[in-house]
Image (cartoon, rainbow, N blue to C red):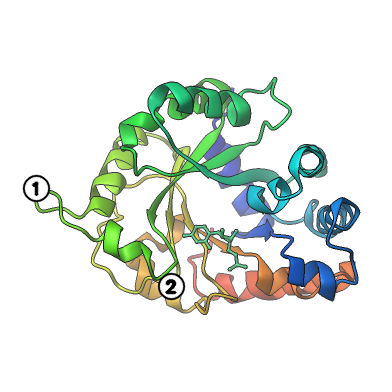
Amino acid sequence: MESFGARLHRAMVERGPLCVGIDPHPGLLARWGLTDDVAGLDRFARTVVDALGDRVAVVKPQSAFFERFGARGVAILESTIRQLRDAGSLVLLDAKRGDIGSTVQAYASAYLDPSSPLYADAVTASPYLGVGSLAPMFELAHEHGGGVFVLALTSNPEGAAVQHARTPDGRTVAQTVIDEISQLNAGAEPLGSFGLVVGATVGDTGHDLSKVGGPLLAPGLGAQGATAADLRTVFGSSLSSVLPSYSREVLGAGPDVAALRAAADRVLADCRAVLPAR
Ligand SMILES: O=c1ccn([C@@H]2O[C@H](COP(=O)(O)O)[C@@H](O)[C@H]2O)c(=O)[nH]1
């Protein structure tokens, strides 16, 4: 079975290095002329699938915006994931799960087992109960050709207080996460299946990303203030592994399908100007 890393590498070559989020904020629903309810959520998600599912490498539904509508919102998340996969984009479910290992096993079954209704190509995970607690996700991802993106240096200003804290061996907490994920990807070609989340907003933090071997998801572009040019500062010599991620910057162009496509094309061009050619 082809690994997630190999599938992602091919998608980034064929469609370009871009992830677009589906984040149906109440304010965006209103701007799109939609009601802040399940019907509005459904129309919003379907429009993004129609506009981008056949052209963007990775689409990242933000689970929180579906969960806030309860079971019916989660049902729409399930159908959105299916529609995106049918349209040919890889689906990264942004759920940021993490817990003790025995519970992570259930999260792994929910998101990374092909028989689950919420099965996605990859999922985001929080390592702050210890990277080892995420082992059930890594194992199921490996078994079924899935991926896991682990938070390392998040794009929000509050993250640094935890992530830059020093451990007894002198490394930062984030560097220990980076190093553990690097080990999981050892020897994987052309790209490992275990990624990291590193915000485009974090600046030059001095962290060593050179041995990660997997994709580096970079949120924080656009609405949170980072620009494509900031990717150079944050990622330095690791730019070739970066998967830039935009949500509101692209979604704000909707609901017109052509305008959504144009916005995605524009941010992709901005990123291509900075990232090495594949
Ligand atoms: O460090 C992180 C990790 C995840 N995110 C998520 O990405 C999008 C960003 O949305 P924008 O509209 O482009 O700001 C959102 O779903 C976050 O939960 C992040 O921003 N930073």
**Can residue 261 be seen in the rendering of this structure?**
no
Q: Are marks 2 and 1 in contact (CB under 8 Å)?
A: no
Label of residue 13 in the image: none
Residue toward you, 64 or 150: 64
Q: Does residue 202 appear in this view?
A: yes
Q: Residue furthest left?
A: 169
* Figure quadrant, ligand 1: bottom right
Image mark count:
2
Query: Dot 2 corresponds to which residue?
Result: 201
Q: Out of 144 and 249, give the one closest to the viewer.
A: 249
* Residue mark closest to the camera, 2 vs 1: 1
Q: Position of residue 243 (x, y in %)?
A: 53, 58
Give x and y (percent) for residue 195. 44, 45
Name the residue: 80% across, 51% down.
54
What amino acid does circle 1 point to?
Answer: Pro
Residue 167 is situated, as x and y percent measured from the top left of the image, at 14, 50
Relative height, residue 113 to residue 239 (above, below): above
- Considering the image in quadrants, where does the C terminus appear? bottom right
* Left or right, 33 with reference to 82: right
Sequence-wise, the earlier of marks 2 and 1 is 1
Quickly name the residue at label 1: 168
